[in-house]
Amino acid sequence: RDLTNTDRRMALQSIMRAWLPMSQTLLEMVAHCVPSPPQAAPHRINRVMPQPVLKGTKPPGLDDARNAVMACNLSDEAHRIIFVSKMMAIPKAHVQGAQNQAGDVKFLAFARVYSGTIRKGDKMYVLSPTHDPSDVDSNEVQEIVLNELYLMMGQGMFVVDEVPAGNLLAIGGLETSILKTATLSSTLDCPPFGAMMFQAAAIVKVAVEPEAIADMSALVEGLRLLNRADAFVEVSLMETGEHVIAAAGEVHLERCIADLSERFAKIPVRVSPPIISFREGITTKAAATSTTANGRVSITCSVAPIPNFVVRAIDDTSERLKVLLLAKDPKSDENKLIAEEFMNKVTSLREAATYDEQGPEGIIEKTLRHAWALGPKRIGSNILNVSTYTASVDDDEKEFGHAYAGIALGLRESYEAVPHEELMEFDLNAIEGSVLTGFQMATDRGPLCDEPLTGVQMILHIAVNEEQDGDGADEDQYGPLSGQIINTVRDVIRKAVLKAGTRLVEAMYLAVITTTSEALGGTYAVLGKRRSQILSETIREGTGVFIIHAYLPVASSFGFVNQLRAQTSGASTAQLVFSHWSMLEMDPFFTPTTEEEREEFGEDGDVGPNISRQLMDAVRRRKGLKVEEKIVQVATKQRTLARKA
């Protein structure tokens, strides 16, 4: 009957279904093309189980555990090692033997066996992501017994007695032991598995509260369950007492709110307007100087923008870089491999960039060779270079700091730091920690709207001033010198960044829109209203379907899908995926200076919307920071309420 259908596509589909059934074909392709666990384990070991950062001596069983994972060992003598990637909230109707238990859902751990054969009744240790095999604290390690093992088959969870290495399974009874991810091992010498990597970032946040204040305890419990059930969502408590949910986008956020109110908390909740994350960057070089409160130390900061391809490489490999930069032995084989991978990624991103963005030859080594530290949080995309200091006015500049990051990346050989001379009542060696703390604080909160800095390279020059008469008597009123250094470093970096053409950096989605020729006009009309950047438009061969690729700012994406459907009568569909961070070219503090600019933008630059200023003021207003705005635009103009035809 299908072959005699007048629609040729229906006839072709019936032939293809009979020839290549989807389920069988997909299963065969997986079996033939995807490598088996024993084949894939040696290639994945450095990613899934990186060398841990050890505080003490290396335990003898650490290499045995890694080798067991690498070999995917099935024997009973091998270490039993499991990785739990997330906790799942499963309706109890789908779990064998759980129908009589209290509650509607049951939390099961989604896990994979990497070594050994897991049997019901086995005793295992729960190792957190920060577990150190060389410094085991018995208070932080929990011992559990595996009593519930399930085979995941479609929607059903079926009880099994044992699971060999290389297989997936669900484990019950771990909801009180694991929050999101964990490593289960039969030995304490096992290193923890690496952190999960996501293509997106939690950039959309909302504050939630119950409609009835009496339901606050139910909301807190619901947020705890939501945080456990969704491996990507981030739940936090702000200093203001607000409960904040961070999600990947609008659709993910809607799903989280629905799960919170319908499944976990089971109460009506109020949701605040979306909170969008931004970053702050610079466009030019600049310098600024500041002095400590007691006048003893002057610090000069020079800032310059980092090439965009270096920033993207640091953001994409932050977790791997963290292992490298915090390692005690950066020259080990594992860490050398991480450094090589990072440098290869930087080189490939530079080659993929445009000619203007690539910069001169040697720009990569020049940027990273003298790197002392990264920030914020020690793995951010801002670099503090080795700095200089002078002990007196006539003294020559000497090196201050140590190129730990440059050495770890293999761009320079390890060297012994030259000890600083003790100056008067303080030692410069003692204030290196204060300088690093001030750097981390400055990069965590930028000068525009307290958002993190990105793509800023900094060099400090520290000058020790001569002690004036009477300074020593007032020393106590300014507090310890270390605290003064922290505040001065933070302030001088903020001043230099403000002078360097500060810009807002916003998150961008890659929008893939599928539409028809009749709906092209409405699609472009919606994109034009939301500051989008069209990348390409292609037509699918043999059909009238158009595929549009565009960058869409996250701040302008709310309601985009619904408006697109309404404007095109459902003919257009969009898929939004986090792509990158993009700098807004518009200066938030722009004021016209030339005659042409005054004619175009008005005397005060208030003709036409300054998007950067609007976004900056919105963030500052939300955070309770000072907002410079005119309350009364024209004081002598009388407002007329009457509407005359």
Image: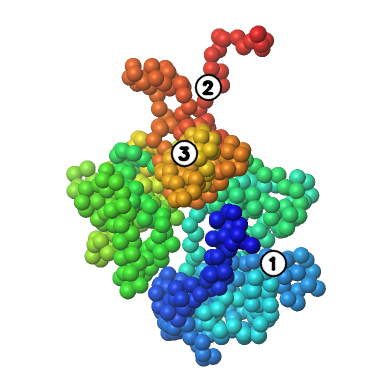
Q: Which residue is mark 3?
A: 532
Which numbered disc, 1 or 2, marks the residue closer to the eye?
1
Query: Which circle marks residue 440 in the picture?
Result: none
Q: Is residue 429 visible?
A: no
Q: Which residue is mark 2?
A: 630
Secondary structure type for disc 3? loop
Which numbered disc, 2 or 3, marks the residue closer to the eye?
3
Contact (CB < 8 A) between labels 2 and 3? no
Q: Quadrant of residue 105?
A: bottom right
Q: Which residue is mark 1?
A: 90
Secondary structure type for disc 1? strand
Q: What is the quadrant of the C terminus in the image?
A: top right
At a point 62% along the width and 11% down the height, the residue shown is 639
Q: Is residue 318 left or right of residue 259?
A: left
The numbered mark, 3 or 1, whose residue comes first in the sequence reads 1
Determine crowd level at label 3: few under 14, some 14-19, many 20+ residues with C-alpha closer than 10 A. many
Amino acid type at image mark 1: Ile
Amino acid type at image mark 3: Ser
Contact (CB < 8 A) between labels 1 and 2? no
Height in image: 598 above or below 281? above
Q: Position of residue 423 (x, y in %)?
A: 28, 52
Amino acid type at image mark 2: Lys
Secondary structure type for disc 2? loop
Contact (CB < 8 A) between labels 3 and 1? no
Q: Position of residue 395 (x, y in %)?
A: 19, 47
